[in-house]
Amino acid sequence: MKDEMLSTLAREARELSYCPYSSMAVGAALLGKSGKVYLGANIENASFTPTVCAERVAFFKAISEGEREFVKIAISGGPKGEPVRKSFAPCGVCRQVMREFCSGDFEIMLVGETIEKYTLEELFPASFSKENME
């Protein structure tokens, strides 16, 4: 799948965000090795700790449907109702979830006015993974 299409899907997923407290809408489009794309949007909660990020929503949807191998993810975020301007990097918890299912070369696309590309290793060096449990 072309990066532009995955980026567009991340922007579209952003419109599904439930963010009444922060007004920061985030969307994610996760490409599985199977070729299927899983969308996620952030979902906030008044008590904040149950809030879940768009990236984790996409991963959990994919995992609950049996997908276990992933190619890349596009993430788009910013103030709700405004055009995307800046890139929006995944939080530490999302990076840890990605590391559970992805290797260091997993591609992360940050979709702003331009597309920035990173590997998981670049954004999450010296990470803890299941290999540490062996």
Image (cartoon, grey):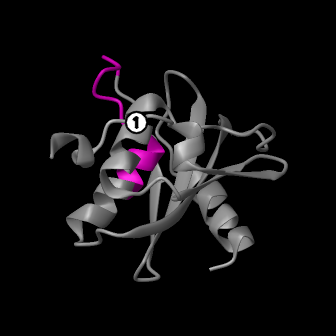
Label 1: how many residues lie within 10 Å, few (<14), some (14-19) or many (20+)? Answer: some
Q: Which residue, given by chain and number where applicable, does mark 1 sit on?
A: 127
Give the residue displayed 52% in from the left and 48% down from the top.
120
The image shows residue 15 at horizontal and vertical percentages of 59, 51
Classify the position of the N terminus by image quarter. Answer: bottom right
The image shows residue 40 at horizontal and vertical percentages of 45, 54
Along the viewing direction, whichever of 3 and 24 lies nearer the viewer: 3
Using the image, determine if residue 90 lies above or below residue 5. above
The image shows residue 7 at horizontal and vertical percentages of 68, 62
Using the image, determine if residue 20 lies above or below residue 60. above
Q: What secondary structure do most residues of the magenta stretch adopt?
A: loop
Give the magenta-colored segment's residue range.
46-58
Give the residue displayed 22% in from the left and 72% down from the top.
66
Would residue 25 be counted in the magenta stretch?
no
Give the residue displayed 29% in from the left and 72% down from the top.
67
* Residue 49 placement: quadrant: top left
